[in-house]
Amino acid sequence: MPLCEKVTVEIFEEKTEVSVCHCSRCRKWTAGPFFSIFIGKKENFKLVGEQFLKTYHFSSESERAFCKECGSVIYWKNEQDAQYSFNAELFPTLVNGYEIKKEYYLENKPNYYNLSK
Ligand SMILES: [Zn+2]
Ligand SMILES: [Zn+2]
């Protein structure tokens, strides 16, 4: 759930694998690396409160959605294959089981932070 709790995302299968994106676009978007869980196709989740979402297209390849009430990041969608990755922090009951599985654009990571796996 985002800060305002107006949007809920229900996933039908528990996820523990976290992807991290260090690209400059995700860092601008989230004020840090983007920690996400890959959910895949739309059939794999139920989103309630879609009217609170605002989407942003940096390019035709992806869609970024955030909550227009509180600004929380909701998902990144790959427009090529219509697969969704959600903000890992939307699922507080899962976070303690998370493990970082994959890091993207590590070569673009700035020096001021490091992740310890
Ligand atoms: Zn990124
Ligand atoms: Zn919100």
Image (spheres, grey):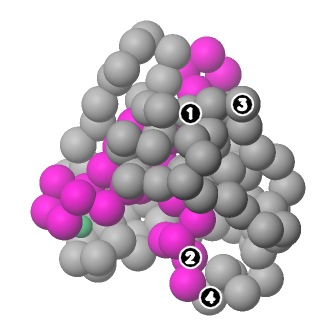
| Left or right placement of residue 74 versus residue 88 in this view | left
Counting residues from the start of the chain, the first of labels 3 and 4 encountered is 4
Residue at disc 1, secondary structure: loop
For badge 4, the amino acid type reads Thr
Tell which of 115 and 111 is nearer to you.
111
| Front of the two marks 1 and 4 | 1
Q: Which residues are magenta?
A: 64-92
The percent position of residue 52, horizontal first and vertical second, equals 20, 56
Q: Give how far across and how far down residue 55 sits, in percent.
A: 29, 36
- Farthest left residue? 69
Sequence order check: which comes first, mark 1 or mark 4? 1
Q: Residue at x 31, y 50 (%)?
A: 66
The reply to whether residue 16 is in sight is no
Instruction: Report if residue 82 lies within the magenta region.
Output: yes
Q: What residue would you read off at disc 3? A: 107
Q: Earlier in the sequence, mark 1 or mark 3?
A: 1
Q: Mark 3 and mark 1 in contact (Cβ < 8 Å)?
A: no
- Badge 1: few (under 14), some or many (20 or more) residues near its Cα, within 10 Å? some
Q: Identify the amino acid type marked 2.
A: Phe
Q: Which residue is mark 2?
A: 91
The CA distance from mark 1 to mark 3 is 9 Å
Q: Position of residue 65 (x, y in %)?
A: 35, 43
Q: Nearer the viewer, mark 1 or mark 2?
A: 1
| Badge 1 amino acid | Cys
Identify the residue position indicated by label 4 in the image: 93
> Image quadrant of residue 17?
bottom right
Query: Label 3 amino acid?
Result: Glu
Image quarter of residue 28: top left
